[in-house]
Image (cartoon, rainbow, N blue to C red):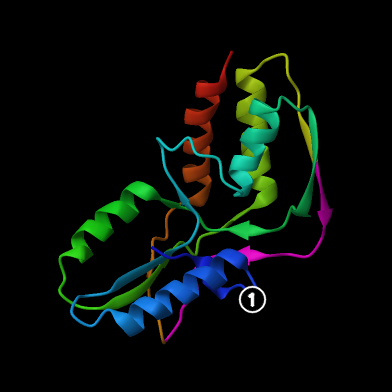
Amino acid sequence: MSSSSVYIASHPVGSSKLICENYLNNNLKDTYLQIWRPYNLVGDKNFNLSDHFHNILIKKFCIEERKNHHFKGSANDERGYSSTKKFCKLIIDKSNLKKNFLYDYGNSKTIKVKQIAKIFKSIFEKNFKKKKINFTFNSNQKNINTIKSNKIIKSFDTKENSYNIIKKYYLSKIKFYEK
């Protein structure tokens, strides 16, 4: 497993993953090397909090119980989310192939961060009826994190509905944090 962070210049995780990929490519000669670079996976049962925007919302408003938060990024940032369930099924199918490969895995159908925040706010305030939350963003520079066509690296574009994936994710998580 690698990640899309390999495409970000000077990214500490991406740089480390590229070093690992190169090491494996140069040193595994008697086995098949299959590398996946997934973009923005979201699962129904995963309660791990990462630095992904959707999890920061949960951390700030459900765990830390903040009423306001100022985000460093842009409300116009875009992300293409894919379900972990679909990804796992593909990995199982492809792992039986006796060949080397490197695949990007992601979704070109994006959702803006401001839409993610609105989904979260709506679900949060509906489930925690007396709590209202607010958030702001400090940047206008747009950042898009989605799979792109690449002639060198093969890719799987899930073309899933990012809005529905995020909404389903928040509905399951908010119920967990209800008091």
Magenta part of the chain: 136-151
Report the quarter where the C terminus lies: top right
Residue type of the residue flagged with mark 1: Ala
Residue visible at 47% across and 64% down in the picture? 3
Name the magenta segment's main secondary structure.
Answer: loop
Kindly state the secondary structure of the residue where label 1 is placed. Answer: loop
Rendering coords of residue 56 (x, y %): 65, 41
Q: Nearer the viewer, residue 20 or 112?
A: 20
Residue visible at 63% across and 26% down in the picture? 124
Residue visible at 56% across and 64% down in the picture? 13
Rendering coords of residue 88 (x, y %): 30, 52
Q: Nearer the viewer, residue 164 or 44?
A: 44
Badge count: 1
Rendering coords of residue 105 (x, y %): 40, 65
Residue 4 lies in the magenta-colored region = no
As drawn, the residue found furthest toward the front would be 27
Does residue 137 sit above or below 94 in this rendering? above
As drawn, the residue found furthest toward the right would be 138
